[in-house]
Amino acid sequence: MLQRPRRNRKSGAIREMVEETTLTTKDFIFPLFLLEGSNKSVPVESMPGINRLSLDNMLKEIETCLDLGVKVFDIFPVVDEKYKDKTGTASYDENFFYLKALTEIKKKFPEACIMTDVALDPYNVDGHDGIVDDNGVILNDETLDVLAQMAVAQAETGIDIIGPSDMMDGRVGEIREALDESGFTNTSIMSYTAKYASAFYGPFRDALDSAPKSGDKKTYQMNPANKREALIEAEQDELEGADMLMVKPAMTYLDVIHLIREKTELPVTAYNVSGEYAMIKAAAQKGWLDNDRVILETLLSIKRAGADAILTYFAKEAAQLLKK
Ligand code: PBG
């Protein structure tokens, strides 16, 4: 035998020397759930270890994470029913607690990179990412205007990256144009490029209480059966001015991450979503899987598939594990 691949695995030193992929804390984006008010920390039942936090507690959490080397945060608001209407007007009201909190966070931690979410589902009474008409149809072009207003309002707080998660056609271009017209030429867009109509978002919708009141999201989020279609989305987002392209979910869409990585020169990110987190945590709690090893293997695999960065609820825990 001239080739004995095991020779390259014979010791830890050799294995590390020939290692093709390295997972680091710099790869992580930590999604956080913001509550209105103060002194609140409310666990998300379906996501053990994850809490919805009021601003004061979130500032402490961000500080802890920064010390661990996690520097990028994606902040989602938990919106009370009383603020919801048909078109999500609260999302661009400058007095809205989410926008005020973002300003505070950037003021306190200018070195942190803060990302925000653009979509209507936490803000409208229908729990859909776009405006819903009387017949239950999601209105694409009417929604674009609200998304653009929302993005500009978020940019005004000084945040770094806008994350359009709505999957309306043409939204990246509309948002880019609105940001530029308002002078926010330096605000980035990380587009949810290939976002699938997935069953893995359940725990997130529990956390935000943002599940659709009727119907599903299949007329705007992608069909899990499709891969070529992700390239159409990617090309579109790139032409419309996206700075980074995201694939979501991650674990069951590694092929899509790989495909987009091959086709674009832009950074590719992947969202290791709430259901993927819940699945691993549940098995680990039962003692069926080794929590620490499964977390690191999962994140490493997403990176190996081609993701430059990973949005993951494991960010803080994985950073602690990588420190050990
Ligand atoms: C909202 C949004 C969702 C997620 C991120 N932004 C839910 C959805 O589209 O229904 C899911 C994130 C997760 O499951 O962790 N547009």
Image: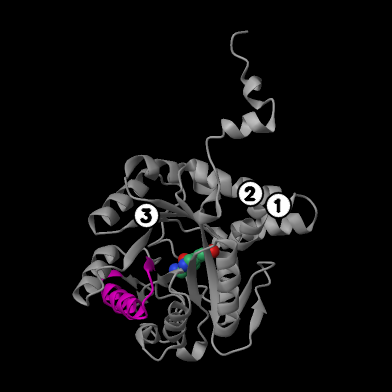
Amino acid at dot 2 = Leu
Per the model, the C-alpha gap separating discs 2 and 1 is 6 Å
Tell me if 181 is positioned left or right of 9 in this view. Answer: left
Residue 3 lies, in percent from the top left, at 59, 13
Q: Is residue 152 magenta?
A: yes
The answer for how far apart the CA atoms under marks 3 and 2 are is: 23 Å
Name the residue carrying label 3.
245
Q: Nearer the viewer, mark 1 or mark 3?
A: 1
For the residue carrying disc 1, how many other residues have a C-alpha within 10 Å: few (<14), some (14-19), or many (20+)? few
Chain part drawn in magenta? 140-163
The label shown at residue 292 is: 1
| Residue 193 can be seen, yes or no | yes
What number of labels is visible?
3
Q: First in sequence: mark 1 or mark 3?
A: 3
Q: What residue type is labelled 3?
A: Leu
The quadrant holding residue 47 is bottom right
Q: Do the residues labelled 2 and 1 touch (CB within 8 Å)?
A: yes
Q: What residue type is labelled 1?
A: Asp
Which residue position holds label 2? 296
Q: Is residue 275 left or right of residue 143?
A: right
Most extreme residue toward the left, as rendered? 181
- Residue 3 falls within the magenta-colored stretch: no
Q: Position of residue 167 (x, y in %)?
A: 36, 63
Residue pictured at 53% horizontal, 39% vertical: 21
